[in-house]
Amino acid sequence: MSLLPHGVTDVMLASGGAPIDLNHPGHYVHWGVIQISVANLIVIAVMIVLFALAIFLPFPKGRGRR
Amino acid sequence: MTAPAVSRTWTGAIRARAVRELPPEQMLPDRQPVYVASWIYVFGVLTLAAFLVVLVSGGVLALKGPQWWHRSSTGHFVNSLHLWSVELFMAFMVIHLWGKFFMAAWRGRRAMTWVTGAVCFLGSIGTAFTGYLVQSNLDSQWISTQAKDGLNAAGIGAFFNVLDFGQMLMWHIVLLPLVVGFVVCIHIVQVRRRGVVPPMEIDPRDAIPEEVTS
Amino acid sequence: MTAETQKWAGRTREYDLVKEFVIALLVVSVLTVALAALFSSPDEKQITISTWSRHAPNDFVLTAATELDGTSGTATYGAPYTHTADAAQKIGPVSLQHIAGVTHPVDTVTDFVITPLTGVPADSALTTALGQWQGAGTSQRQRWASSYDDALAKVTDNDPAKVPPGDYGPVPVMLNRLLTMAQSGGLDGALLAQKQFFATDYTKPLLFIADGSYLEDRARAQHLGGDQWGMMNETGNYPGQAWLWLYTFWYQVKPFSTSPNADALVWGLMALLSLALVLVPFIPGVRSIPRWVPVHRLIWRDYYRGMRPPDGYLSASDVARPVQVSRRPIGGQVHDDDAGADAGRDREHDDGEAAGASGYGGRSV
Ligand code: HEM
């Protein structure tokens, strides 16, 4: 398709030589009515993991109890 | 309770009020109740820190104007800083929201803390949205032409025109950050004024905040 | 005393808020720089009317034909662009879209086609065509434009070259010149210049572009379509506005996915839900969820573990009833307007369960 080369060259400029180039066509998960990009899914998963860690990891015991 | 000396000047009145409402040891305490011992408490501060990084990286983009980052690789990097700090900001904020929800942190006259926090969340969504509109690339063309339908259907599009780059740029870099920044300030002052919310059932040895009289 | 003076009178420990903030700022800064350096950011180049008309000339001409015969998305949009009757979306009987009015009037025939063409210099065929158009009555113009639009829509690839002869009046010449103008970049400028030299308002060119299918094809290829949950997505493999998940969700399910009033309905619903989020502390039931879900037991586990009935003879459920020590005046009018007081009341309701779950009850002293 004629659109593609056009988009692709723009994208090459845009990536600015990042070590991990995310300017490839995205990946998507379809699950019934739900469609989500893998990138968003990773972000949400990381948030849930952070939340769980925040809750389960012991917090350093403070000094100076009164 | 001793009434503060009444000053006849406006200045004096404001000072007296500020000192009364925002005593320094309450604004910047160096001790916290023993129950403040969880990593979940760190997410409010992480959100605040990310907000500052968003403001600074956005400020650099503003210094050079909206076209800069499309042409310069330094500019592109600053744009990347702005984008990723926003992703961090939103992620930290939502984790913070989850935490505060499960702690029912609105108890004990702290409802305003929750309300201002939730307004920060909605305001940040609006700010991020206008940010996507002013990228001036394919993404913003598509987002603006799609979003106009929702806004128009709600009657908002009549005066908030997402197809007007100039208007959206002003909202994104001036109006909305001011509003969000202001509400964040109220939110944090509110947290300090009320003190950190106590656990749901507390040790009888610890006085119950509602009942503490001075 | 005032509520502001309420202070924790129990055990405390040292906690350095400023140090915590400085470390947080450092951590977030480092994370941001690392993410930016690793992943950069997307910048899929904008399209212009010029790129559109060069990459998809047939789509451009077909779109222009719909602007001219008044059948394009913009021409039939309703408020805030046109006065089209019954086009505005409604929530029940109410149409906020209609009430807000036509604040950005667009006349697709004049604004998108005729005015730009009158700026084209020294083209006698075009001058004749425009003269013929201006001289004709409204219904004649409509007939020409409609029959050309219909003919275009029927031929393979909507190719103007394949349109059979017909009574199209000046329309083919006008659209042909509009295409030339568009391809040269002139139309991009003309749509802005209708206002002034300094332009920041892209309403007209964006509406024109969005009436075609080129922009949409590009967007759908990036999975940005509304029915692709596109609002959450970013171009390429980047995370997007994941926080729009709920807003996006409604558009995928009935009744919204099939309703002509989807936008109005979803916006109405989201306005309500946003209000509910803000007012969570005041909503009975919702504000009690955290009592039922024992996440707070984990968050404050150290504290609960250290808890002990003060005297051996108090039972666990007594201990869990902080209201016992309440000196709240009978009648409880204190803070009654405040969610805090309600939380206190909830606590009374939940006493038994809370004590059972609290874990300290079983510990003998
Ligand atoms: C711009 C976004 C926000 C910033 C910068 C921010 C910042 C903070 C900070 C620094 C604290 C104290 C530390 C902590 O407990 O984590 C706090 C507390 C709190 N935040 Fe936020 N917050 C934001 C958004 C929100 C949102 C979206 C909500 C919920 C809807 C929320 C609800 C609360 C509540 C209820 C407290 C009080 C906690 C207590 O008394 O223990 N905040 N916030």
Image: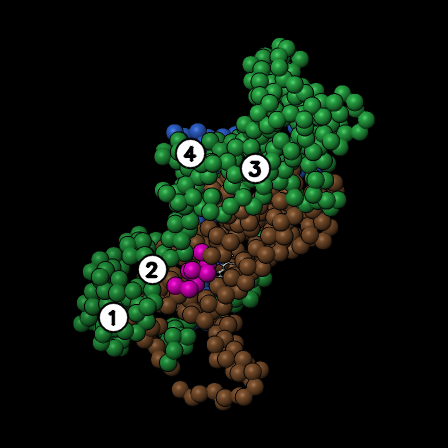
Q: Position of residue B198 (x, y in %)?
A: 36, 66
- Viewer-nearest residue: C125 or B73: C125
Kind of residue sitting beneath label 1: Val
Q: In this view, does A3 lie above or below C307?
A: above
Colour chain B is painted in: brown
Image coordinates of residue B67 in percent, x first then y, are 72, 44
B57 left or right, relative to C231: right
- Numbered mark located on residue B145 in the image: 3
Residue A6 picture location, percent across and down: 68, 26
Q: What residue type is labelled 3?
A: Thr
Label 4's element? loop
Q: Nearer the viewer, mark 2 or mark 3?
A: 3
Depth check: give the residue in front, A12 or C179: C179
State how far apart marks 4 and 2 are (Cα).
Answer: 34 Å
Q: Which mark is residue C260?
A: 4
- Residue C303's place in the image compared with C164, above or below, is below
Disc 3 element: helix
Tell whether position C319 is magenta: no
Q: Taking the image as drawn, is residue C168 in sight? A: yes
Amino acid under label 2? Phe
Q: Distance between the residues labelled 4 and 3?
A: 18 Å
> Of discs 1 and 2, which sits in the foreground?
2
Residue at 27%, 73% in the rendered image: C333
Q: Which of marks 1 and 3 is in front?
A: 3
**Picture residue at 26% right of the left edge, 65% below the top:** C345
**Is the distance from the Cβ of mark 4 to the nearest ligand 1 atom less than 8 Å?**
no
Is the residue marked by circle 2 packed among few (<14), some (14-19), or many (20+) residues within 10 Å?
A: some
Which residue position holds label 2? C282
Q: Read off the magenta span.
A: B111-118
In the image, taking residue C159 as reference, residue B64 lies left or right, namely right
